[in-house]
Amino acid sequence: MILGGEGHAPKAGRQGPPPRRPRAGPPGGAGAGAWRLGLADRWLGDPDDRAGDPAAVAAPEGLDLPPVAEPAPLLAEVDATAGTLDTAAVEAALTPQLADEDLGPRVGVAVAPLDGSAPWTAGVPQVVPASTTKVLTSVAALETFGPDHTFTTQVVDAGASETADGVQRIVLVGGGDPLLTREPVPTERPSRYGFGPSLRELAAATATALTAAGHPQVELSYDASLFTGPGINPVWPASYVPDDVVAPIVALTSDRGYDDEGDPLADPAAATAAWFAVALADAGITVVGEPTTGLAGNSPRLAAVESAPLGEIVEHLLAVSDNETTEVLAHHVGLEVEGAGSFEGGAAGVRRVLADLGVDLGADVLTDGSGLSRENLLAPSTLVGVLAVASSPDHPELRHVLTGLPVAGFSGSLTNRFTTADPAGLGAVRAKTGTLTGVQGLAGIVQDATGQPLLFVVVADGVGAEDALDGREAIDRSAAALAACVCTTGDPTASPTDGPTESPTGTPGSAEGALPATARDVLSPA
């Protein structure tokens, strides 16, 4: 079986945060509905059933409670800007892990303070980043649109049918909501394919509007013209769709482009329109003929649903490494920044947005948004730079990138990881995973033994097929070693330990010849 990246096994179930109930939609169309997510509703039910302020609830009569005292802090506050990266300590911590032959001959490493300044690098200058690429796309999308932005799926009234008397023509318009579902997501469990508004809800709102307007019969068209170009990236292996790695990327999709059996659909837009026709019929509207393609133009809106806020979509895609959702967001960036909602436009748009944020990709190669492409090449220092921008207090709009990173041993794609690593890594490492055949990597944030946060990237892109799991564990052990390390000096004015100045004769994990005798030989910056 070809390993084609994370988030590619729909048959095993696709997890996402549980949703809230749909609420009244934005003005501008009869029956419009909207969808929002909120932690309070997820865990506590309907907010209208609770008092707004617990302190306002009176204690039972006769109950004498002591005053609430301010608790002592469990942990001392850590100044994330204090201290200096101790490169000798970093080198000593990583050397035993990166000398693991299961990593293969190509490993790229970068470690930096939270501000990303003067990253310490070692190994090869560029790596195939796999799904760590999703960090770049997420930052670009949040910077372009903001965390509260939503994507609209709507139905418009295109006027009387030209072929059938007494029949109205309506158009289902895809707005690039990557997590639109066919059926409402049960509130008590996560959706198999994510979370968001549903075609069923949109159909009900549309039927209400059509009935009120006296149109019980309609012809249905669908408009997926927001995105252009092929639905499958030309640089991806042809096996990706038949192997269930990814579905075609289109502006109108539902259940992320998969059928009920978990197989990618050849035409997600047409399938979505067909499902919508069934939902309309169930709501009492007769659909004449089969759905056809057609443009919405400036037709008035009948009904609409809004996606989850972009910030929550980003958290979802980073947690479970959702390929389709990431590619849809890249298309949106391309459309907004470059005027082209395509794979090419998305890659160019992400580059431009990151450059405007101060991260110039230079000689790096970016051909998609999800990291499924083997033609992508990124310097580890580029990934560190993007994480530094997301961590900066100057960019609170990017905070969902950090909160969406999986936590070692606890959440997302790291839930069942770090089983052979130093326990110090559990909970202390937050990182995006990167996996393709031959590629294993992590990019994220780790707290060292003093509590200081560090940015780190460790990617190996020459892992043998038989060493995939062992290589992954070696990557985990590398991140955990940083968590167990006192890798920063306490004096923020101290100079970093002088690192090696000469390039290595080999790279970390090199299988060519004997391993170098010292840590500096193994990890000298490339």
Image: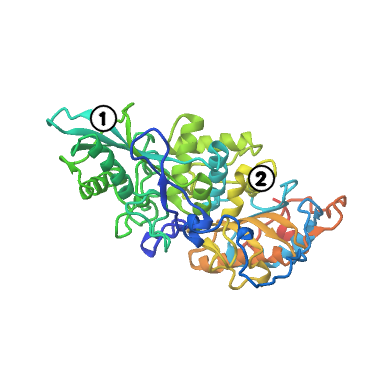
Label number found at residue 158: 1
The amino acid on which the numbered mark 2 sits, given as a three-letter code, is: Gly
Residue 336 place in picture, x, y as percent: 49, 32
Label 1 sits on a secondary structure element that is: strand
Q: Position of residue 244 (x, y in %)?
A: 36, 56
Query: How far is disc 1 from disc 2 in space, using C-alphas?
Result: 48 Å
Q: Residue at x 33, y 36 (%)?
A: 30
Local packing at callout 1 (Cα closer than 10 Å; few below 14, some 14-19, many 20+) is: many
Q: Earlier in the sequence, mark 1 or mark 2?
A: 1
Q: Nearer the viewer, mark 1 or mark 2?
A: 1
Is any part of residue 106 visible from this angle?
Answer: no
Q: Residues within 10 Å of mark 2 (few under 14, many from 20)?
A: many
Q: In the rendered image, which residue does mark 2 sit on? A: 385
Is residue 227 in sight in this rendering? Answer: yes
Residue 29 is situated, as x and y percent measured from the top left of the image, at 35, 34
Which image quadrant is residue 111 in?
bottom right
Task: Mark 1 and mark 2 in contact? Answer it, CB < 8 Å.
Answer: no
In the depicted structure, whether residue 377 falls above or below residue 11: above
Depth check: give the residue in front, 95 or 79.
Answer: 79
